[in-house]
Amino acid sequence: MSEQTASGLAEGLKPDQVLDATGLHCPLPLLKAKQALAGLAPGQLLEVSATDAGSWRDMAAFTELSDHVMEARVQRGDVYVFWIRKAGNTDS
């Protein structure tokens, strides 16, 4: 996904929870994101902001190895922003 496309997608995303992991060093942004996802219902959207450059790679690898979905990710200056949808069955 190109950054321009991701940025456009991100504009329409409405997160259910926002996690500010700015200032935290690896591996804390990923660990905090995992904790936040654990508290969400399937299908809900988590927005994560981080300043650790390694989070760009870590969040992508995490979503590729899990059932969660990276809806979009953008870099805004020194801040990396990710939108991750929690995996699971959303049928009631």
Image (spheres, rainbow, N blue to C red):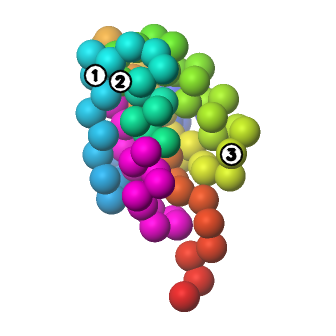
Q: Nearer the viewer, residue 75 or 27?
A: 27
Q: Using residue 8 as the reference point, say whether residue 65 is left or right of it.
A: right
The residue indicated by pointer 3 is 66
Q: Which residues are magenta?
A: 35-49
- The image quarter in which residue 40 lies: bottom left
Q: Secondary structure at mark 2?
A: strand
Q: Secondary structure at mark 1?
A: loop
The residue indicated by pointer 2 is 50
User: Is label 2 in contact with label 1 (beta carbons under 8 Å)?
Assistant: yes
Residue at 27% across, 16% down:
23
Picture coordinates of residue 84, whole percent (x, y):
49, 46
Q: Amino acid at mark 1?
A: Thr
Q: Image quadrant for the N terminus?
A: top right
Label 2 vs 3, first from the N-terminus: 2
Picture coordinates of residue 8, whole percent (x, y):
43, 40
Q: Secondary structure at mark 3?
A: loop
Q: Please tell me whether residue 34 is drawn above or below residue 53 in the rendered image.
A: below
Q: Using residue 16 as the reference point, say whether residue 59 is left or right of it.
A: right
Q: Amino acid at mark 2?
A: Ala
| Res. 22 mark | 1
Label 1 vs 3, first from the N-terminus: 1
